[in-house]
Image: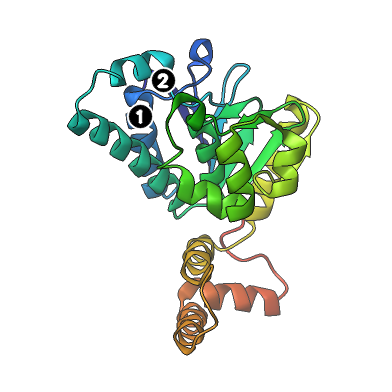
Amino acid sequence: MYTNIITEIDLGVGIITLNRPERHNAFDAALIGELSAAIDLMAAEPAVRVLVISSTGKSFCAGADLNWMKSAAGYSSEENLRDARGLAEMLRRLAQCPKPTIARVQGPAYGGGVGLVACCDVAIATFDAQFSLTEVRLGLIPAVISPHVIAAIGERYARRYMLTAERFSAAEAYRIGLIHELVTDDAALDEAVGEIVDALLKNGPGALAECKELIAAVAWKPLSPDVIEDTAQRITRLRASAEGREGMTAFLEKRKPRWIAQG
């Protein structure tokens, strides 16, 4: 079905793996299109409760593919706008996916690859991973990834790393909030991702989707009467939902809720 990615679903986990190791999993129009389609399918698939974004080879994602950039140099404004919108839309779909998302970062992420990491709810990387927002070195700007990167690392660190385009370590990515956890190697990476997946699968699927919407709704907003009312309405709706009633009943009865595999 796909030529640039691999998809699989196993025990509630959907995995989308970038599979262009010879190109360092760099973006081109085809890869972006396949990612958009796969994210949509995973978001709509009831069997998927958690989505993991991973890559093959030595790099997580090297940003824009060189051949793609060479082609873009000859594009018209309309063609460049189409490509930019395609990348922006793919990132939006990932950022707004109703399922929790995890970035499994086994190697370097540059440019748009940093944006891909920033779009995910949780990001785990190996110690030897490196990162860079390289666009200004090419006379460009990290435009369509900027909302996601700034949300992840904040304006202050965005000013440094978007302006300098310097390469920074996984330890620095952890310090500034791009990465949540660092591990030693691929085996430890799989174990850490598995632990996060296990934690997520214990939670109500509907509640997870609602929680993601809640975070987006209240982030960076002042504590106004409208925000307070919105949060009250949200919890009221969830308490009355079938999932909410099941979760509270299971807690009181000291049993697992139905969304957790029994056994």
**In the rendered image, the vertical position of residue 65 relative to residue 156, given as above or below:** above
In the image, taking residue 138 as reference, residue 165 lies left or right, namely: right
Q: Quadrant of residue 189?
A: top right
Identify which residue, 223 or 252, lies in the foreground.
Answer: 223
The residue carrying mark 2 is 4
Q: Is the image coloured rainbow, by chain, by secondary structure, or in one colour?
A: rainbow
Q: Nearer the viewer, residue 27 or 105?
A: 27
- Counting from the top left corner in percent of width and height, residue 115 is at 51, 39
Residue at 60% across / 35% down in the picture?
A: 164
Quadrant of res 151: bottom right
Q: Which residue is mark 1?
A: 34
Q: Is residue 121 left or right of residue 189?
A: left
Q: Amino acid at mark 1?
A: Glu
Q: Residue at x 70, y 28 (%)?
A: 129
Query: Residue 128 shows which numbered tag?
Result: none
Disc 1 is placed on an element classified as: helix
The N terminus: image quadrant: top left
Q: CA distance from mark 2 to mark 1?
A: 7 Å
- Name the spot of residue 191 as percent of width and height, x first: 74, 36
* Residue 50 seen from this side: no
Tell me if residue 52 can be seen.
yes
Label 2 close to label 1 by CB (< 8 Å): yes
Instruction: Name the kind of residue labelled 2 in the image.
Output: Asn
